[in-house]
Amino acid sequence: MVFSRFMDVMLIVFCMAATLLAAALTVPAGFGLATMLTPVMLLWLEPHLAIAAVAVVHAAHNGWKLLLLKADVDVTAIKRYGWAMILGALIGASLSTSIDAQPLLIVVGFALILLPLLSISERWTNYRLPEAEDRWGGFGSGFMGGLTGHQGALRAMFLQRRLPDKSAYAATAALLALVVDLSRLPVYLYSDGEALIEFLPLVAGSVLSAIIGVHLGKRWLKKWKKSHITTMITIGIIASGVLYVLEGFRM
């Protein structure tokens, strides 16, 4: 019993440390919290619960980040992306709760491999997409956010070139991510909320770390080059994606 409690405490401490680092890094990068935190949650939670738990942390992180950076938000982005992101998130979240663990893990894995590559590809990030295609980007970002919990890479693909200022990019990315979070969370909680209560200390500790991480990341936003942080995050994301796919096919 004592050993079990000790392991539970160590689990919470480990998740809090991982969340703190991920939350700080993703302030300048504009995405990556879910993709870095999901592998940690999947060590103890089955995929549906892991995605729901990360979504709670993700929403708290984006809400706090938006509070600190709200002066830099480009509000016109909501008009371009907002409604499509909400629609995509609702559809994706609905599918997420009805898919078995094995295919969901494979879907998450391929998302981790492909989406970060798209976000840093010269073909995508150096091309200013026509205004009409913003809606497709918003829908795709919301859909992938609802289905797998990983929305940031598609959003970054459309947003980076439109908002070259790193503070405006980080603030607007937080607002758009929060739109998706608030759209998909009710679906997750309706399906998995009761089961998630068992892991409330883990989720609460991760939320606290995410908020602290925002303050650290805001300092890094002023000092670091976003391109360097994004590249570092992408390497970890792709490696995690490969492991997910392999694990999914072995189940």
Image (cartoon, rainbow, N blue to C red):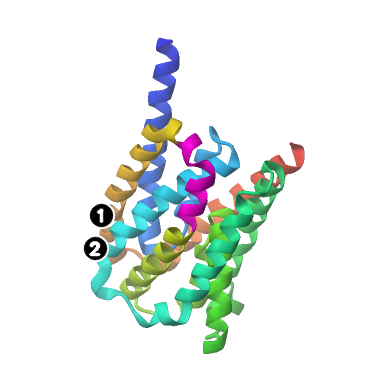
> Residue lying furthest top in this view?
1
Where is residue 122 shown, x and y percent of the image? 58, 76
Q: Which residues are magenta?
A: 184-196
The kind of residue tagged 2 is Leu
**Few, some or many residues within 10 Å of mark 2 (<14, 14–19, 20+):** some
The secondary structure that most of the magenta stretch takes on is helix
Mark 1, residue position? 215
- Does residue 21 belong to the magenta stretch? no
> Height in image: 251 above or below 146?
above
Query: Which is closer to the viewer, label 1 or label 2?
Result: 2
For the residues labelled 1 and 2, say whether their Cβ atoms are less than 8 Å apart: yes
Determine whether the residue tagged by mark 1 lies in a helix, strand or loop.
helix
Is 194 left, or right, of 174 in this rendering?
right
**Few, some or many residues within 10 Å of mark 1 (<14, 14–19, 20+):** some
Residue 220 is at least partly visible in this image: no
Instruction: Please report the residue visible at 55 percent of the width from the left and 85 percent of the height from the top.
Output: 129
Where is residue 116 shown, x and y percent of the image? 57, 62
Quick one: quadrant of the C terminus? Answer: top right
Mark 2, residue position? 68
The kind of residue tagged 1 is His
The tally of labels here is 2
Where is residue 43 shown, x and y percent of the image? 55, 34
Q: Quadrant of residue 94?
A: bottom right
Judge by depth and name the residue closer to the eye, 188 or 216.
Answer: 188
